Image (cartoon, rainbow, N blue to C red):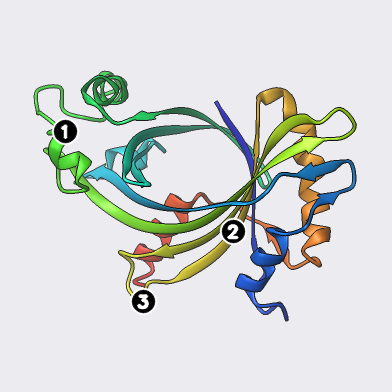
């Protein structure tokens, strides 16, 4: 299960968005919480759907993620949303024949994928059309991660993710700047709710709640003809 709060850069803010994320990557702490050293990396994501958008219609996200040369498969289903907070059922694992089957079998059982049509693993792993699945959105995210600890006690409560997201497959390749606060467990919900206001304050107020996932935002941009 995934539990996170998502914030995004406020358009028109006097602080450059890249500079703002760089500042958040360096602050040592906010009231009651400290941040670990920043860990930068690059994520390349390919989102899949059927030609008739069955997955999107069922609010299911299917993603191939490439990180440091390693491929992962992810399936997400929304469970709850309250403002910027989203709780999702999530299956994520390194991509191989077994995890591929585990990810797709529930989609077949739900009637979201044809039961009798093969989805080739090799093509999927390359981000190419794979049987009934076609790539619908491609993003590149330059992410800086920082583990979050509650003080006193140095208790791990989540991860601060500072994301510069480029919608590679969308006309004009728009760029967005997001901040995600991911809970270490469902028991850390109160912590990330507190961190929401603390991080906004640390950003000078130049962040606002976001009610869209990266996938939903991207598909809305596609629909708008961006």
Secondary structure state at the residue bearing disc 2: strand
Q: Specify the quadrant that holds the C terminus.
A: bottom left
Q: Which residue is mark 2?
A: 178
Q: Nearer the viewer, residue 58 or 183?
A: 183
Secondary structure state at the residue bearing disc 1: helix
Gap in angstroms between the C-alphas marked 1 and 2: 31 Å
Mark 3 surroundings within 10 Å by alpha-carbon count, few (fewer than 14), some (14 through 19), many (20 or more):
few
Image height check: is 23 above or below 192? Answer: below
Horizontally, is 200 left or right of 103 in the view? right
Gap in angstroms between the C-alphas marked 2 and 3: 19 Å
Image height check: is 12 above or below 218? Answer: below
Q: Which residue is mark 1?
A: 121
Q: Earlier in the sequence, mark 2 or mark 3?
A: 3
Residue 209: give its label: none
Nearer to us of marks 3 and 1 is 1
Q: Nearer the viewer, residue 214 or 34?
A: 34
Cβ atoms at labels 3 and 1 below 8 Å apart: no
Mark 1 surroundings within 10 Å by alpha-carbon count, few (fewer than 14), some (14 through 19), many (20 or more):
some
Quarter where residue 170 is shown: bottom left
Secondary structure state at the residue bearing disc 3: loop
Q: Earlier in the sequence, mark 3 or mark 1?
A: 1
Gap in angstroms between the C-alphas marked 3 and 1: 31 Å
Q: Residue 71 location in percent, x, y?
A: 31, 39
Image height check: is 56 above or below 78? Answer: below
Q: Which residue is mark 3?
A: 172
């Amino acid at each position: 299960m995934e539990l996170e709060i998502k914030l995004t850069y406020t358009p028109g803010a006097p602080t450059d968005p890249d500079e703002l994320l760089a500042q958040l990557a360096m602050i040592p702490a906010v009231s009651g919480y400290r941040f670990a050293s920043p860990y930068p990396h690059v994520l390349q994501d390919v989102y899949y759907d059927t030609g008739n958008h069955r997955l999107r219609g069922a609010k299911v996200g299917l993603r191939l993620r490439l990180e440091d040369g390693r491929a992962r498969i992810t399936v997400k289903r929304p469970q709850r949303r309250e403002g910027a907070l989203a709780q999702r059922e999530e299956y994520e694992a390194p991509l191989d024949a077994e995890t591929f089957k585990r990810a797709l079998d529930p989609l077949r059982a739900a009637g979201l994928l044809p039961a009798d049509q093969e989805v080739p693993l090799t093509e999927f792993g390359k981000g190419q059309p794979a049987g009934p699945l076609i790539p619908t959105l491609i993003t590149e995210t330059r992410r800086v991660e920082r583990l979050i600890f509650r003080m006193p006690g140095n208790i791990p409560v989540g991860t601060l993710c500072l994301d510069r997201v480029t919608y590679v497959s969308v006309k004009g390749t728009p760029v967005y700047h997001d901040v995600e606060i991911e809970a270490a467990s469902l028991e850390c919900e109160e912590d990330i709710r507190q961190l929401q206001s603390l991080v906004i304050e640390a950003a000078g107020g130049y962040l606002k709640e976001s009610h869209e996932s990266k996938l939903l935002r991207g598909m809305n941009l596609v629909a708008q003809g961006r």
